[in-house]
Image (cartoon, grey):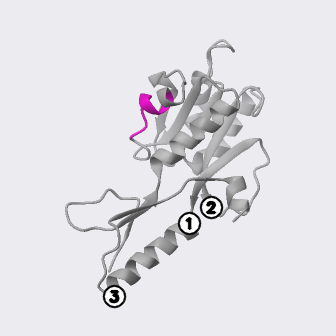
Amino acid sequence: PKVFLFRQPGPGSELVVSGDGDAIIDRSLQHLVKRGCRRVATIRVRGAYSGLGSSHFERQGLSFRPQWMQVVERGDTVVLGSLLPLLMDYPEKQRPDGLFVMDDSLVDHVASALMAMGIRIGTDIQIVAHSNWPVRTPCVLPIQRIGFHVGHMLARCVEAIDLQRRGQKPPQVQQVPALFEDEIASL
């Protein structure tokens, strides 16, 4: 018995457990809209959330600018020091007022770059950031975190393996929900 994490199902009968990628995008953009954002940018790592596109923004009534969807290489955080100033190089009423940081390894570097530019997080720009739950450290900046609970994923994997061992067929694809920090706290 086996289960794959965050993998596209192949031609065989591969079982996959993953986070609900569309839900994390939609919920994050909805949160930013509720906070008054109308111009939202995204930063993600290559290979993750590659399905992100204009339709996600349009569903939320947000304007879409392809140049505001930035992709960096995994582990290449140095580039954020020059990328963020370019992303924010618009007059105040035309630059992004919301930012979805789609990988938790980028959050500290993005926040540092914005603060070095004098941009106030929570005032000048609202940020939603991907996070893997559980997280033991609180966020000291006004950044809303959303993500997938590793415990939920592990439970689904173990359940799928147990079903296979008993000769039963689990669902080929199972997705765990995207949860905000306050939703995790209430579990």
Which residue is pictured at 70% across the width and 38% down the height?
Answer: 112
> In terms of sequence position, does the residue under pointer 3 or pointer 1 come before the other?
1
Question: Which residue, given by chain and number where applicable, does mark 2 sit on?
Answer: 133
Q: Nearer the viewer, residue 169 or 41?
A: 169
Q: Amino acid at mark 2?
A: Trp
In the displayed orientation, state which residue is furthest to the bottom: 166
Q: Nearer the viewer, residue 84 or 137?
A: 137
- SS at badge 2: strand
User: What's the distance in space between the residues labelled 2 and 3, CA to CA?
Assistant: 30 Å
Label 3: how many Cα within 10 Å (few below 14, some 14–19, many 20+): few
Q: Which residue is mark 1?
A: 150
Magenta region includes residue 53: yes
**Dot 2: within a 10 Å radius of its alpha carbon, few (fewer than 14), some, or many (20 or more) residues?**
some
Residue 71, x across and y down, in percent: 46, 36
* Residue drawn at 77 percent across, 43 percent down: 141
Other residues around mark 1 within 10 Å, as few (<14) / some (14–19) / many (≥20):
some
Q: Position of residue 81 (x, y in %)?
A: 61, 33
Q: Residue at x 53, y 40 (%)?
A: 26
